[in-house]
Amino acid sequence: MSINRDMKEYILERNEPTRSPSGAEKASWVYYGTIQAAVYKKNDLKVSASEKYIESTHTGVTRSRKLDSDGYRLVRDGIIYEITDCNTEGRLTNLLLKVVR
């Protein structure tokens, strides 16, 4: 299985909080660009003590270094993946994703 073959284009959106007329803060997702990423369904048989890994539904890898957890999400074919954790220390950035819609 080649990661390069699995790379697909995703829309990258960034959370820019805005204030509603009542003064409450609400999430406003704005287009930030496109990135190439490979997204895989998480292996449920793997046991991990990490709470973020347990609540995630998918894992992914990308070459992009501009990502940060809890501030970005990926969109493709009507499916929205919220980035719950990312590790940019390796050659590729590892992502933990949770399907929102």
Image (cartoon, helix red, strand yellow):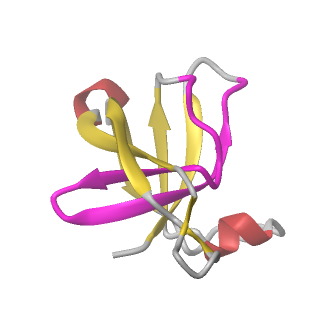
List x then y, in percent, for residue 14.
47, 46
Query: Which residue sits at x=80%, y=65%?
Result: 50
Which image quadrant for residue 53?
A: bottom right
In the displayed image of the protein, which residue is found farthest to the left? 77
Membership of 75 in magenta stretch = yes
Q: Is residue 32 above or below residue 50?
A: above
List x then y, in percent, for residue 94.
59, 38
Q: Is residue 57 above or below residue 30?
A: below
Which residue occupies the foreground of this view, 18 or 1? 18
User: Magenta part of the protein: which range?
Assistant: 65-89
List x then y, in percent, for residue 66.
56, 26
Query: Which residue sits at x=52%, y=73%?
Result: 20
In the displayed image of the protein, which residue is found farthest to the right? 49
The quadrant of the picture occupied by the C terminus is bottom left
Membership of 16 in magenta stretch = no
Q: In this image, 70 relative to 81: left or right? A: right
